[in-house]
Amino acid sequence: MKLGHRIARVTGFAVIVLFGLNTGCGQPEGEAYIRQHYRKAEFRIPMRDGIKLHTAVFSPRDTSQKYPFLMMRTPYGCRPYGDEKYPDRISLNPELMRRGYIFVEQDVRGTHMSEGCFDNMRAHLAIKRGPNDIDESTDTYDTVEWLISNIPNNNGRVGQWGISYPGFYAAAGMIDAHPALRAVSPQAPIADWWYDDFHHHGAFFLGHAFPFLAVFGHDRDGLTESHFRSYDYGTPDGYAFYHRIGPLRHIKQSLLTNNPLWDAMVEHPTYDAYWQARNILPHLNNVAPAVMTVGGWYDAEDLYGPLMIYQSAEAKNPNVSNALVMGPWVHGGWARTDGDRLGDIHYGAKTSTYYQQEIEVPFFEHHLKDAPSPQLAEANMFDTGSNTWHKFDDWPPAIARMQSIYTTANGGLRMNASPTEGNGAYDEFVSDPEHPVPFTERITLRMPKTYMNEDQRFASRRPDVLVYQTEPLTEALTIAGPMTAQLWVSTSESAADWVVKLIDVLPDDTPTTEQERDDWPKLKPLGGYQMMVRSEVIRGRFRNSHSQPEPFTPNEPTLVKLPLQDVLHTFKSGHRLMIQIQSTWFPLVDVNPQRYVPNIFEATKADFVKATHRVYRSNEYPTRLEVPILRDSGRLVRSDSRANRN
């Protein structure tokens, strides 16, 4: 069956409802297919400062037509090395491989078989005064110039793409781009390390940082085909492992000897010039290629990056074709998974196949081969509550209207009605650094991709997690865009982190599907499931400035504004909307000592103390979540779908 879809035009956007996916196309994959259809050659391409970058080029053996380039620049290596050694894949989209491109993979400067020095998130140089002033933009430009001039049978056009770190290099490459670079797709790109990957508003993502540091924290010893390392943790239990280590100052002795990136983190605990220079967003000027930024709503590594790169490119380059795609995916899930489920939750269709066939292929075919213009909207967004694709004219959608959801007594939530309780109204809990709240039920050393939509009942039953929820909704509620938690809080000590989670509580009578029964007990019954929709954390010292931290005054009510990343989620009729507030999230985030110290990376065991935290819900100190509600002509927009989960 071919792809079936229904498009409903609503003010400002359309809804695409999937009810069948089968492309009918072959799935070219594997070394034998690539050898049969492509010829590999390796080159050392000179940059303007004389440094040579290792580059692998796969050209179609059919030379009856000219082909565009499709390039990825990566720090992860272009294995296997050697003209006669072929990989299993040269594209994560099999249809692009079938249609024919000149595929290019390049080790970025200072990695693997490329010369030069590697610099994590190399700073962009807005002003270049000579040939030795290089950045990732100039390396991309010089590579494109060489390819166009030296690789035969090309049509003079280049596309660039990449997922995660290669997504950052794609974003950097579109700045002051070579005229031949016609289409760029940064996918799950890193934008700013104070918000992506291992920092979130100053909170350190311990559970994610260490696998990254094992790869990118070490200097290499000359050219090498393999630079990856790993750590021996001695246990599969990350909660126990990091708890045993204790304060961050002990980690270097345990794992991170001779790790310059870790040393830089310790030396730069605030958003100072070091981190600011590694923010690509201010530099997305003079972008000429068409841009399609791709991200996943459940990207545990780089959710900030795609949303902000799209917005920055849009604001700075109003005349450039600039699109955004967000689906129900984990980090790179549109290229590595079917996209039909994550953990216990099903999304009704193979959303990755839809993206690859209906969005990604038409984007590159149009801009690089003059295929008909794709019906690509400004923002192509998947609703994770109704399981429908939406086409918006803008993002965030202008038709959404902000509303406030207030915390109330007895764990309640109230829409657009400010509290009437006196100023003494609050809820409190004791936060004990020795017994932090876990961020997942899983026993793991890493940051599992499923934590972002995982059932939160394990947390809501703890005394150090505050829970607020609505009554069952009588009509659907769609949130579309970025949210902000306005927290009025206090602590008996001088430091605290604050975690806010937005949760969709499924009705108690939600049926368990046959598939789930077959998988039992691996999958949970969905009745009463507390599905996390969005979560975020802020290190309280950075509530007013990320570069100028400050302590709390003990027991003084203080406003903490916590921006939460965008969502597109429909809370269906009969569901409840829940907010959880807590102060620890371990070992995803390191434990705050709760006694203010200048640098948490250097805190001692004696600095870690229990504290009583309060969250206020009074008329003077109203804690609330500000959310954009999607409306049409004053009515909440509803979307039905054969792909609905419930």
Image (cartoon, rainbow, N blue to C red):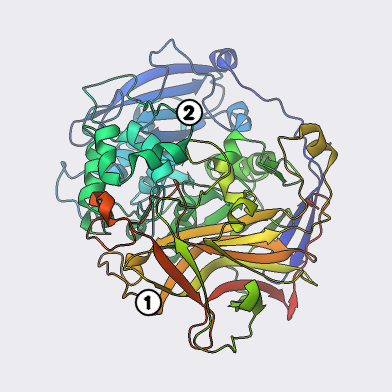
Quarter of the rendering occupied by the N terminus:
top right
Whether residue 247 is visible here, answered yes or no, is yes
Residues packed near mark 1 inside 10 Å, few (<14), some (14 to 19) or many (20 plus): some
Whether residue 157 is visible here, answered yes or no, is no
Q: Is residue 490 positioned above or below 109 on the image?
A: below
Could you say where residue 636 lies in the image, as x and y percent from the top left?
Answer: 74, 73
Instruction: Of the two numbered discs 2 and 1 on the same chain, state the one appearing first in sequence.
Output: 2
Q: Residue at x 36, y 47 (%)?
A: 172
Marks 2 and 1 sit apart, C-alpha to C-alpha, by 60 Å
Identify residue for label 2: 103
Q: Residue at x 60, y 72 (%)?
A: 628
Q: Is residue 569 positioned above or below 19 on the image?
A: below
Viewer-side residue, 325 vs 451: 451
Identify residue for label 1: 555
Left or right, 478 with respect to 78, comes to right
Viewer-side residue, 107 vs 39: 107
Q: Secondary structure at mark 1?
A: loop
Left or right, 375 with respect to 451, comes to right
Q: Residue at x 40, y 13 (%)?
A: 83
Left or right, 505 with respect to 110, comes to right
Could you say where residue 643 lies in the image, as x and y percent from the top left?
Answer: 79, 49
Amino acid type of the residue tagged 1 in the rendering: Asn
Residues packed near mark 2 inside 10 Å, few (<14), some (14 to 19) or many (20 plus): many
Could you say where residue 136 lies in the image, as x and y percent from the top left?
Answer: 30, 43
